[in-house]
Amino acid sequence: MAAVDAAFVETGRGLSRWRDPHPNRMPLDEEYSRVTNPQRWKILAARSEAWFEALGAAGLAEIEAEAEVAWQEPPRFPAARTIRAVPLAPGAIPLVVAMTGFEGVEWPAVAIGAGNPADVLEVVPDCACDACDSGSQDALNVLDEYVICVVTGTYRKLRRGRREITVYSKDRMSWSGFDKRRVSLGRFVRGRLTTSQGIPDGRPGRLRLRRFVGGRFTASPTTITDDYYTTTNDSTRQLKFRRLDTLRRAITNKLRRGGNRRNERKKTEKILARPKRWNQIHGSSWLSGNGQQ
């Protein structure tokens, strides 16, 4: 990191850092559709270049300044330049950084990738609008974290069907696709499907909807309230029942999510211990090739 910081003094020369523009207030509405001075995000490209210089100077990797990279799925923006570091340590995976042009673009950013073909770990910033801007240091820290997880060999991604597990460090991982699929009752039972607000949709079996209304006891649109329906015309009872139902569902959903989260983590840990029939991107530490620790 000391070598990266030293290189950054040169690669970032002439670029300015900035603080969070709204530390004690909510962003203004007009800030969500505005990108002020996209050129300032060149600081991310400068930090990336500092990483490549430090890795090359330490003898840890060969640097390809203008690389032709194959992607599993390309970044969400057109890349103006792509740099790749190919590690010299046995079993280590390459590091890739793709950059936008930073002149007159709506989304100035860099994408950090790993492997060959490369898999996108993260795009920094995730959104460059003024409302989402939390200062240059936050973005630089995110970039460092993702590069470090590749260089130290802690990065690991597993895929199997729609399920996916990503490990960034010993204390940080994510997973998706382990939730149970919902079945559309409109394919099996005669009746109508409704949206989450209870309004008849009229397209059974085509959307992931929350509530099935039987053909015989359906509620009319005049008796429908937000996410709750009833066949009584007593407005006082409707309001009372709706509040109780909302509270009950909120508590139930929170408990259910907590339990599901714990169960999913246990499944994830078992898979990581024995990833049989999983496609995996993983590599050793770059530091193991020359005796460094």
Image: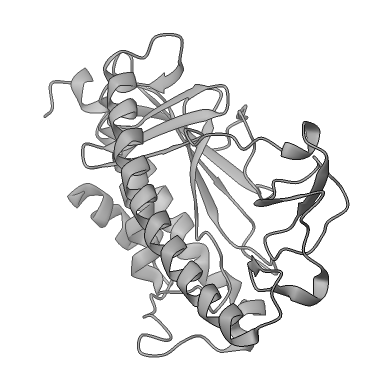
- State the image coordinates of residue 234 (x, y, percent, origin top left): 65, 83
Is 292 on the left-hand or right-hand side of 159?
left
Quarter of image, res 101: bottom right
Residue at position x 34%, y 20% from top?
271
Q: Quadrant of the C terminus?
A: top left
**Count of marks overlaid on the render:** 0
Which residue lies most toward the top here? 276
Colour option used: one colour
Task: Decide which of 118, 3 is in the foreground and name it.
Answer: 118
Task: Decide which of 63, 94 is in the foreground and name it.
Answer: 94
Residue at position x 58%, y 32% from top?
67
Q: Is residue 270 visible?
A: yes
Residue at position x 38%, y 49% from top?
257
Is 271 on the left-hand or right-hand side of 228?
left
Which residue lies most toward the right here? 202
- State the image coordinates of residue 35 (x, y, percent, origin top left): 62, 76
- State the image coordinates of residue 12 (x, y, percent, origin top left): 39, 63
Image position of 242 with respect to 77: above or below: below
Task: Decide which of 247, 64 is in the foreground and name it.
Answer: 247
Q: Is residue 50 visible?
A: no
Is 60 on the left-hand or right-hand side of 98?
left
- State the image coordinates of residue 88 (x, y, percent, origin top left): 32, 19
Quarter of image, res 286: top left
